[in-house]
Image (cartoon, grey):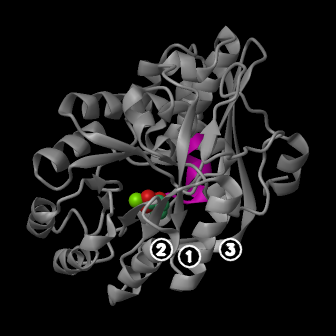
């Protein structure tokens, strides 16, 4: 169970169409595949999706952090030494996606070594989650068409609508069009990625009051401290902290400060070990959670459903698990399938997925 080698492999897979939102845009999955090898001949895998507009990481930065800092700190440790791994990696600030991919690859290797699914090692509550699809900026008719296609082809009935454009009526028109065309049975919520001011957010929420939104996420920056508290105080649906509250300390600060009333958990930035801490904190504070998407590929989406399905709290709401559908290809031997609006974990040890080596050879950037 000893870690003997760590690989970080950059790859690039194009999106069929770019995903646009208030803080950025993604047209190619320029991710890093992390592989943790042990002295038993086991390899655990996970992927790091760098998001410079959210956390400051880049593909080259993830490679450098893994190869130049973290690989040495983890090599020689046992797979069960996760608290030591965490303490060592925390000596370096930032780099959440790099640290998380290493953490999840270690869990995958541990599951494979013990011949147990990671979902059972974590909590094993259920084997599936309902899926929420994230709709990026476009014309109302295009976003309605995409939502209808997701419902018809995959059974998805929950949609997170990206908002935060100016004027805010660009976005309120989209949400209204979605409600009118998809009816009352679909769940709609909005994510502003800090695009609006507090007062713009309040106006937009007022104008969407009749549309039955279930959540509002990061509509304005948490750093606009008083404005954000004012907004959250007058918001009558849960207000989700996403990029403003990554660590348990940040969750505590934002929630106790009145800047959020619910929390997005993203394994791409807190791994399984950090997400466990965030989950337990949310449970203790009595907060709703959403399993969020960091525009993950199939491997990252599997990590999200493995964690989200492991607990009662995180499996209540639909998880953001479908944006891999927009990628032109992926790396798994057996592609993920969303069926009846649900994504199910795979039987088998570890994460239950395997990397297609031919595809990796095709898409890797360092070969
Ligand atoms: C989200 O929930 O904000 C967009 C940027 C990012 O880091 O994640 C996505 C989705
Ligand atoms: Mg968000």
Q: Pick whichever of labels 3 and 2 is earlier in the sequence.
A: 3
Residue corresponding to mark 1:
144
User: For numbered disc 3, what is the local secondary structure?
Assistant: strand
Q: Residue at x 56, y 23 (%)?
A: 119
Return the x and y of residue 367 as percentages of the image width and height: 85, 52
For ligand 2, the image quadrant comes to bottom left
Q: Image quarter for residue 112? A: top right
Relative to 264, say whether 184 is above or below.
Answer: below
- Other-residue count near label 1 (Cα within 10 Å), few / some / many at <14 / 14–19 / ≥20: many
The magenta stretch spans residue 59: yes
Magenta segment, which residues? 56-69
Q: Residue at x 62, y 17 (%)?
A: 110
Majority secondary structure in the magenta region: helix
Q: Pick whichever of labels 1 and 3 is earlier in the sequence.
A: 3
Residue corresponding to mark 2:
178
Residue corresponding to mark 3:
17
Q: Pick whichever of labels 1 and 2 is earlier in the sequence.
A: 1
């Amino acid at each position: 169970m000893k870690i003997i080698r760590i690989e970080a492999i950059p790859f690039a897979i194009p999106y069929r169409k770019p995903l646009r939102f208030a803080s950025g845009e993604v047209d190619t999955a320029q991710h890093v595949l992390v592989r943790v090898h042990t002295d038993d001949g086991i390899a655990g895998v996970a992927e790091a999706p760098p998001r410079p507009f959210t956390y400051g990481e880049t593909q080259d930065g993830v490679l450098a952090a893994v190869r130049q800092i973290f690989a040495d700190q983890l090599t020689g440790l046992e797979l069960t030494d996760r608290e030591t791994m965490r303490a060592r990696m925390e000596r370096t600030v930032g780099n959440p996606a790099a640290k998380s991919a290493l953490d999840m690859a270690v869990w995958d290797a541990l599951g494979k070594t013990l011949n147990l699914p990671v979902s059972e090692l974590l909590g094993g509550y259920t084997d599936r989650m309902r899926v929420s699809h994230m709709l990026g900026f476009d014309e109302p008719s295009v976003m309605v068409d995409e939502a209808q296609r997701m419902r018809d082809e995959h059974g998805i009935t929950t949609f997170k609508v990206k908002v935060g454009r100016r004027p805010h009526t660009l976005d309120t028109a989209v949400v209204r069009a979605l409600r009118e065309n998809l009816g009352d049975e679909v769940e709609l919520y909005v994510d502003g990625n800090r695009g609006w001011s507090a007062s713009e957010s309040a106006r937009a929420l007022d104008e969407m009051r009749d549309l039955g939104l279930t959540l509002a996420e990061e509509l304005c920056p948490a750093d606009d401290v008083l404005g954000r508290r004012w907004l959250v105080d007058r918001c009558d649906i849960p207000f989700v902290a996403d990029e403003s509250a990554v660590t348990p300390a940040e969750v505590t600060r934002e929630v106790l400060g009145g800047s959020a009333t619910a929390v997005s958990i993203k394994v791409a930035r807190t791994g399984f070990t950090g997400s466990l801490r965030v989950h337990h904190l949310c449970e203790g504070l009595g907060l709703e959670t959403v399993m969020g998407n960091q525009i993950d590929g199939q491997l990252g989406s599997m990590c999200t459903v493995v964690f989200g399905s492991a607990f009662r709290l995180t499996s209540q709401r639909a998880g953001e698990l479908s944006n891999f559908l927009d990628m032109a290809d992926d790396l798994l031997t057996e592609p993920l399938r969303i069926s009846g609006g649900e994504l199910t974990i795979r039987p088998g040890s570890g994460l239950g997925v395997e990397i297609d080596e031919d595809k990796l050879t095709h898409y890797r950037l360092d070969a």
